[in-house]
Image (spheres, grey):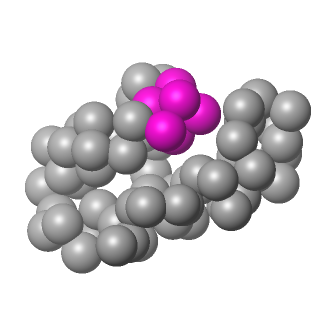
Amino acid sequence: MEQLPDSVDLDIFERRIGAALRTIRQVRGCSLHGALDVFTERYEVLRREQPDRFRLTREEYSEGVYT
């Protein structure tokens, strides 16, 4: 995966999804759909490699996001 700014990881840890997506779109020059794909991939890597950095469970994290 192409390097993303550290702010994206911080936004993911803090559940600032909109901010992370905006940064990804700016850096990658991609569509919202493309940014969502990158976000999801990075989220999964962070969950696997640094699970203790998340304050919310997987279920809590996505609660209300897709409704």
In the picture, measured across the screen, residue 44 lies left or right of residue 19, that is: right
Q: Position of residue 65 (x, y in %)?
A: 40, 61
Nearer the observer, 11 or 30? 11
Is residue 65 placed above or below 11 in the rendered structure? below
Q: In percent of the image, x 34 and y 73: which residue is there?
A: 67
On screen, residue 65 versus residue 52, left or right, reads left
Figure check: 12 above or below 31: above
| Image coordinates for residue 60, horizontal then vertical, percent | 64, 53
Magenta span contains residue 14: yes
Residue drawn at the location 82% of the way across and 54% of the way down: 48
* Magenta highlight on residue 20: no
Q: Position of residue 16 (x, y in %)?
A: 39, 36
- Residue at image location 42% in from the left, 24% down from the top: 7
Can you tell which quarter of the image residue 19 is in? top left
Image spot of residue 32 (x, y percent): 18, 66
Q: Residue at x 49, y 39 (%)?
A: 15
Q: Is residue 9 left or right of residue 39?
A: right
Query: Bounds of the magenta span?
Result: 8-15
Residue 51 seen in the current view = yes
Question: Can the viewer see residue 8?
Answer: no
